[in-house]
Image (cartoon, coloured by chain):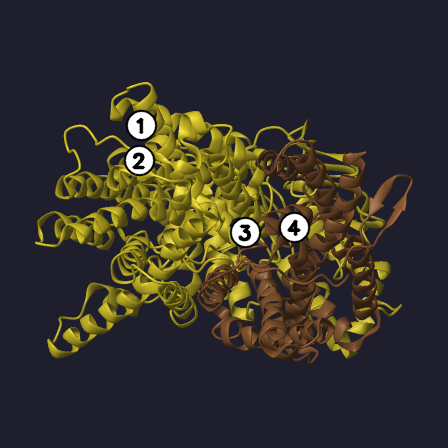
Amino acid sequence: MLVLSAAVSGVALGLLYGLIGLAIVMLYKSTGVCNFAQGTLGTLGAFIGFAVIRDLALPLYLAIVLSLALSAVVGVIVYFVVMRPSQDAGNLNQTVRTLGLSMLVLAMMDAQWPSSPYRFPAVVEGGGVTIAGVVLPGQNLLVAAVSTVIAILLWAFFKYSRVGLSLRAMAEQADTARLLGLKSSRLGATTWAISCVLGAVVAVLIAPTAFLFPSMMDSYMMFVFTGIVLGGLTSLPGALLGCVIVGVISNVTIVSFNFELSVVVVFALMLGGMLLRPQGLLGKPEAARL
Amino acid sequence: MIAGDAKSKTVKASLVIAGGLTVAGSTLPLDTSMQYTLVAASAWAVAAVGLDLLVGYSGQASFGQAAFVAMGAYLVTAMRVQLALPLVVATILGLVVVAIISMILGSIVLRLRIFGLAVSTLFFGYVVYTILMGDSLADFFGGANGMLVPAFEVVGSDPRLLMVVSGAVLMLSVIVTSNVTASQTGRALRLLKSNEAVAAASGVKVKRVKLFAFVYCSLLGAIAGVLYSGVVGYLSPDGFTSNQSINIFAMMVVGGSGTIGGPILGAILLTVVPGYFLREGRISAVIFAAMLLIFLILLPEGFYGLAQKAWTKITGWVHRLVPQPKSAIDSAASDPEAEPAAVSAAPSGREVFRAAEAGDRPTLEIDDLHVQFGDFVALDEVSIKVQRGSIHAIIGPNGAGKTTLLNAVSGLYSATKGDIRLDGASTKGLAAHAIRKRGVIRTFQTPAIVPDLDVLDNVKLGLDADERSSFWVDLLGRVATGRRERALEAQANWALDAVGVPRSRRSLMGRGLDLSEQKRVELARGLVGRGQVLLLDEPTAGLSAAETDALARVLKDVHERFGLTMMVISHHIGFILDIADEMTVLDYGKVIGNGEPAEVLARPVIAQTFVGVEAEPDALASNSSAMNTLALGVG
């Protein structure tokens, strides 16, 4: 029974991983950069919310709205200050920039909020429903609802909105998209804003259970990356699916054994996926262009 | 582009950097803390140099280098403590274990492109850290409490002696890494860095060479770990977090990737500044990370690139101040282009074509070939026989499947149905490099010139498939490979003479060539190899009329002298009528005509495909500009 409820809450956890995964895949597809700062930037969003609640004494909901808005601003700043200058330095240089950015933000949070971990108020306290003996805590239901809504919103955004279509065009053929007159810097800033907001949503949802501290997302990120690899690196639905699989498996192994073993098991899952299906569950094999 | 251009011939500058560090650390009157910091910097430098081979020279990535440093440090220390093994024995055993682990890991993660490689190596680093922190192996490795490192034999814990040992290891790794980058393996690495499919079609065993670079990188990481354990005297998992992997990567980038010496500079900077000047406080971590970002953004080429530019400037001023005699290179450049007539006798290996000429069986038989991508049928029932010693042209509108046909023949795409036979033997199921080994050489629509190798090295790539050296020999450098390299150079020079690339252009980097030169260099690469069939994809695309004529002359000349079988794709009808013996026309993946070129072109159905009008080609020729090239031959 414990294992079953671990599996159920693993789905919720996996959906959270999936949201970060969506942000990373989206950014990778439209800019070619693998954003290793995704987790830390999200944590920054949660800390902003925390500071707003503690120092300005605003109610939780208002604080969350404010922190999401500020996260979008952070994303735009990151794009223009860190990513956009000397872009021709290559994807590797840019990827290492995200790693450096992650270190910088982490160090800044450490300096600013030295007495972490902090307790972060949950959006939904207690509650929950019991179905066939399995308890579904309110927080898990909220997570599942939020993730589903965001996934649908993202899907609609990419499918129908002008900006979303432009982003997809950038992702498929960046040069052609530029030739067609798409403004790459505005799109780049938009992508970074969206991914920072997604990161903050996840951090706000995780913080009540994990406590709030600067490196709280580090271990999650490994699981997210595994989900992305399983899903196929460039597939948005694949990232979500892969992350849910990882969420369930990691949660079940943590409950049945320990955290240490769950890390090893998830890593083995990643290697197994690479061996058996290198293009991922929902990815397409890449054909070389000559 | 993953990493910038790698640089050649950096061994002297790199040795100066490594030697300077060693001398400074072992002789200058520094305080003890600074001395230890410099030894640590030299240890990290070894790890960063290893990473440079993988990233800067091979275009792969690893964000888990600290894990290999940790494995080296922990395994060797544990064997010294628990089994009381001497340092050297423990090191050798430790390196063997690390090599095996890295080989297993590499053979899995190297299947993925850069993104997958980056995240899986980062995760690997996290796994190693988690295991070292955890309780399950705590008896052996000390868990979160860490492990004391006994002093090294002979040198003890004297920082000056440690510096001498660590510096010597660093210099040795600089020499060996430079040897590799300057060798056949190094050429293969830079080729696969520029394009993996091209590398495979050129006979490079891509998986093997990548794995070599990965294991090499891991082993230098492990060696760095052993050196590091001697400096710190105490191992704790916190020294080997993912952040440390990123630090090593940053050392390489800040110093300048693809330079060997650059990563050493980066290691000195990123170890000394935080370890000595910014020792305490949370603010120092902020300054350090900000500094790293500023370097990445403002100095993407790294310190080495900056220093090299400054050096070129300074020597430029010196040259202007001191009048120089006209240099040999300048006078060579002003020579008229080396004429193809001056070609000497072909070196050995060329005879193969002559010897194989006997018999009238077709060299290349394409039999009922189907190639399909998803629902899209790219080639359908394509059957072509290419006669020995003939030039066979393939023409057709854009999207007819011409390049797909060449890709299928060279093993880059696999056929859904049908067979391709070389001298009667099927090539079904053979990998691209194996087909290259059987004598199929090809050129590409966009010339596959490696931008960061010089012209001579670019041509030598054509010989490497047939005259393979071994990784072990390549590690030894010119001492072991010198004679062989000189022989390759002679052949490469011969081929460059044949295609008319003047001597003065041969030490240029591939990046600096114009399109016509790139095409000729690629053709020279095709000529040196011991090939049976040369597949040329659009050799005339983008060339001027004069350049096309020159290329036709070179091809005819080469063909006459060596009887080489060629299959040529071209849109240029005049060029094809000039050189081809036989021609196949493709349209929508099907063969719609085959035979003697002028005769095929005269057929109404062919003319219709090309001009889209149903009429006699002769009538069209007079009033349609689109038919001008066609009319050249038909009229």
Identify residue type, mark 4: Val
Please tell me which of labels 3 and 1 falls first in the chain.
1
Residue type pointed to by label 2: Val
Residue at position x 52%, y 36% in the image: B106
Apparent colour of chain B: yellow
Give me the C-alpha separation between circle 3 and circle 1: 37 Å
Residues at marks 2 and 3, CA–CA distance in whole angstroms: 36 Å
- For mark 2, give the secondary structure: helix
CB within 8 Å, label 2 to label 1? yes
Dot label at residue A224: 4
Which lettered chain is shown in brown?
A: A
**Secondary element at image label 4:** helix
Cα gap from disc 2 to disc 4, whole angstroms: 33 Å
| Image-based side of B598 in relation to B459, left or right | right
* Spatial CA span between label 4 and label 1: 36 Å
| Any part of residue B336 in sight | yes
